Image (cartoon, rainbow, N blue to C red):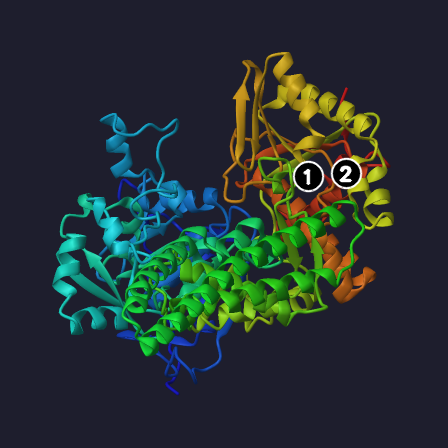
């Protein structure tokens, strides 16, 4: 092992005017010190150039991964810290949890704000982002729309069905036409990364030049995926002629990008498909929220069942069989006229075989209908809360049986299951891969047989899980083993992993629920800056703790005394709105719809901000934003948020996943886990409006328990400030004297 030497870290953060910005400093440390501690934890030393103390091998037999955690409060500049870490190590991927946080990175380091970081040779650190299809306008369809060739109510996005790169076309034999052929209809299409064996196969068949012409590409460039295998991307010299969605994949090439910003969904997809590039470090911003994203469910929907038995594919099979049947009949008729018994016998056998195929395919359709009937029956039982937990296992067995039967007739499907490390499947929308994905979900569910809870509601309100006819259209298999699922994803990641968070979960919850054992924890700024000023009404409901714990976090808590809650909430919002822009946080939109209607009716300025539903209007007063949860990464400092109002304590709703956790850990330990998660969300919300030293924010709630827990947390922060900053006068006794734990609203 090489002798460790003192690092010569180059802090190189600049604004758009090319002015070098100083690093944030606090008692006991600063941003630069955090970077050095993280790099030291990864056992790196710098002797002229970067070297490693140990040989790093990213494929089978590699050394154990190193997982570190950066724990530092909101507003301490964690994004700049992790970018410097990626710069020092070489290349990196930063995984963020929300679009708002991803957009913040985009604006700050590769967009309108113009900030940048310099590498050692004076070159700017190249930061690129990757988004899902729905975030891009399809240029091809947009141009056709402008020419009047197609009609859309909204702007056409890249995730629409029926685009050249998303639709499924079949030839006369019922075979799926490759996407590189259907996609070539669009002049901007260049395709996603291909594994090396696909390119080699085309090259061996002398088809590579032909396919490059179809793609209208100038070159094929390669990178190494996280499994150590070569991947190829078709590129064009003129990047303006490339679809914005597909151009994102250029970021996988080392010459194009140093740091890739991905959201969690994209990172999961690229990890399991084997397309994720090999980098030196993978960094998880808002690591606590990232871990919670694995506390979810596997869904089986009507769409999944319908996709297994694809009507178009099997209609083509049936047409081919019918045509073969007719041809055989004609041949048999002619042969019978010449009395050729041997040939006639052979043709009759062919007829019998064809008839068996026809009957079998008809039987497949009946099997699918039987599964759908069973699926609907199970949903109806669960909707009435009268269901047997074992019945879902029957559904999974039925689905797997249908897949096995289908494989007898579509031989292509037999070769579709891929090793995710080698990325055998090049096109993620293919019918064959659709079946492979559904089978993969069924296999995971079977793996955890007897260890999960099944439900018809997800994380959001039940109404969001219904189809256009008002029927529940999916089942949730809630698997309370995020530790095992996290381990599976980490096994397909690089050796250096870094989490960054402002609200760390309890150590017991981290270990038991998520299986997290850190090699090193780096403490950044541990006290919250700014000033949180507490206000509350003369009468505050005391239902928070009572309903949350006695009813074990059931939905009763959220509906308890709803009229009283809403009346107090409206009073708080109208009374406090004079202080400035107001953010109202609530567990569900139906609990504050009355508030929105009130603001709308009387002309107050409001913004209704929920998943997939936005509405705003009014001119009276300051802006009131009503949101289901705090958008992490949204900078609400300065005058963007002066009043923060919680409708209730943010306990998770007792959905199927919470029941599954109870099944694994028991009631007592589950209560502790849920309390940790709720406090984490409360602290995140309270911290967002005070990100700088001079910031302040008024806090109020119509729930006394929420108010009490916020006050308890803030006293700890003020005590920490007072201990670390004795020169500052923090008048705790004056502010919290007697039993009056806040300033009443007059």
Tell me how many marks there are.
2
Residue occupied by mark 1: 587
In the image, residue 583 lies at what x, y percent? 61, 31
Residue 177 against residue 664 in the figure, above or below: above
Residue at (73, 61) in percent of width and height: 391
Quarter of the image containing the C terminus? top right
- Residue 682 lies, in percent from the top left, at 67, 44
* SS at circle 1: loop
In depth, the one of 400 and 348 nearer the eye is: 348
The disc, 2 or 1, on the residue closer to the chain's N-terminal end is 2
Residue 265 position within the rendered picture, expressed as x and y whole percent measured from the top left: 47, 54
Q: Quadrant of the N terminus?
A: bottom left
For the question of whether residue 417 can be seen, the reply is no
Q: Is residue 654 above or below residue 220?
A: above
Q: Are marks 2 and 1 in contact (CB under 8 Å)?
A: yes
For residue 274, say whether it is visible: yes
Q: Position of residue 557 (x, y in %)?
A: 80, 41
**Callout 1 crowding tier (Cα within 10 Å): few <14, some 14–19, many ≥20:** many
Between the residue at mark 2 and the residue at mark 1, the CA separation in whole angstroms equals 8 Å
Would you name the residue on which mark 2 appears? 558
Res 482 → quadrant:
bottom right
| Circle 2: element type | helix
């Amino acid at each position: 092992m090489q002798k460790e030497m003192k690092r010569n870290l180059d802090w190189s953060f600049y604004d758009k005017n090319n002015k070098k910005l100083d690093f944030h400093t606090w008692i006991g440390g600063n941003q630069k010190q955090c970077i050095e501690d993280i790099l030291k934890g990864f056992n790196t030393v710098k002797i002229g150039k970067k070297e490693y103390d140990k040989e790093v091998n990213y494929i089978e037999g590699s050394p154990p991964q190193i997982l570190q955690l950066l724990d530092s409060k909101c507003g301490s500049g964690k994004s700049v810290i992790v970018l410097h870490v990626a710069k020092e190590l070489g290349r990196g991927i930063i995984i963020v949890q929300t679009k708002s946080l991803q957009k913040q990175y985009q604006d700050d380091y590769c967009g309108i704000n113009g900030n940048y970081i310099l590498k050692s040779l004076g070159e700017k650190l190249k930061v690129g982002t990757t988004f899902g299809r729905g975030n891009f306008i399809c240029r091809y369809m947009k141009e056709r729309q402008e020419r009047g060739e197609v009609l859309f109510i909204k702007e056409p996005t890249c995730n629409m069905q029926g685009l050249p790169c998303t639709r499924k076309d079949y030839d006369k034999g019922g075979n799926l036409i490759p996407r590189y052929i259907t996609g070539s209809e669009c002049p901007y299409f260049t395709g996603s990364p291909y594994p090396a064996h696909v390119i080699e196969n085309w090259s061996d068949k002398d088809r590579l030049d032909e396919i490059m012409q179809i793609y209208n590409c100038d070159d094929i460039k390669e990178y190494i995926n996280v499994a150590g295998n070569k991947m190829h991307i078709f590129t064009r010299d003129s990047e303006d002629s490339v679809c914005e969605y597909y151009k994102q994949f250029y970021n996988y090439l080392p010459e194009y990008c140093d740091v890739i910003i991905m959201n969690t969904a994209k990172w999961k997809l690229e990890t399991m498909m084997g397309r994720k590039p090999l980098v030196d470090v993978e960094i998880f911003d808002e690591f606590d929220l990232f871990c919670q994203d694995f506390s979810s469910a596997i869904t089986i929907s009507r769409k999944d069942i319908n996709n297994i038995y694809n009507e178009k594919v099997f209609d083509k099979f049936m047409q081919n069989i019918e045509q073969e049947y007719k041809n055989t009949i004609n041949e048999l008729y002619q042969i019978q006229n010449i009395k050729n018994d041997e040939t006639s016998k052979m043709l009759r056998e062919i007829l019998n075989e064809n008839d068996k195929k026809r009957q079998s395919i008809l039987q497949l359709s009946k099997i699918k209908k039987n599964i759908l009937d069973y699926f609907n029956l199970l949903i109806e039982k669960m909707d009435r809360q009268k269901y047997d937990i074992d019945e879902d296992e029957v559904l999974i067995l039925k689905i797997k049986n249908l897949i096995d039967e289908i494989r007898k007739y579509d031989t292509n499907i037999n070769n579709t299951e891929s090793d995710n490390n080698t990325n055998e499947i090049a096109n993620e929308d293919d019918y064959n891969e659709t079946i492979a994905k559904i089978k993969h979900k069924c296999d995971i569910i079977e793996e955890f047989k007897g260890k999960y809870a099944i439900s018809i509601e997800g994380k959001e309100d039940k109404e969001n899980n219904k189809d256009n006819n008002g029927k529940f259209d999916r089942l949730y298999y809630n698997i309370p083993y995020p530790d095992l699922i996290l381990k599976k994803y980490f096994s397909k990641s690089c050796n250096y992993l870094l989490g960054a968070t402002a609200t760390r979960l309890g150590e017991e919850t981290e270990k038991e629920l998520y299986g997290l054992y850190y090699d090193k924890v780096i403490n950044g700024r541990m006290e919250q800056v700014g000033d949180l000023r507490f206000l509350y009404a003369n009468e505050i409901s005391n239902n928070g703790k009572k309903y949350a714990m006695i009813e074990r976090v059931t939905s009763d808590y959220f509906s308890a005394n709803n009229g009283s809650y809403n009346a107090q909430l409206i009073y708080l919002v109208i009374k406090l709105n004079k202080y400035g822009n107001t953010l109202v946080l609530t567990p569900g939109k139906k609990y504050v719809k009355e508030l929105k209607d009130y603001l709308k009716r009387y002309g107050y300025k409001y913004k209704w901000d929920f998943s997939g539903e936005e509405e705003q209007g009014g001119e009276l007063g300051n802006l009131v934003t009503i949101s289901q949860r705090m958008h992490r990464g949204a900078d609400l400092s300065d005058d963007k948020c002066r009043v923060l109002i919680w409708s209730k304590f943010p306990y998770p709703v007792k959905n199927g996943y919470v029941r599954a956790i109870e099944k694994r850990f028991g009631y007592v330990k589950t209560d502790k886990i849920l309390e940790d998660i709720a406090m984490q969300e409360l602290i995140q919300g309270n911290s967002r409006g005070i990100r700088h030293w001079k910031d302040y924010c008024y806090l109020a709630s119509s729930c006394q328990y929420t108010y009490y827990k916020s006050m308890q947390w803030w006293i700890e922060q003020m005590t920490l400030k007072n201990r670390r900053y004795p020169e500052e006068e923090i008048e705790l006794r004056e502010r919290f004297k007697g039993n009056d734990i806040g300033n009443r609203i007059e």
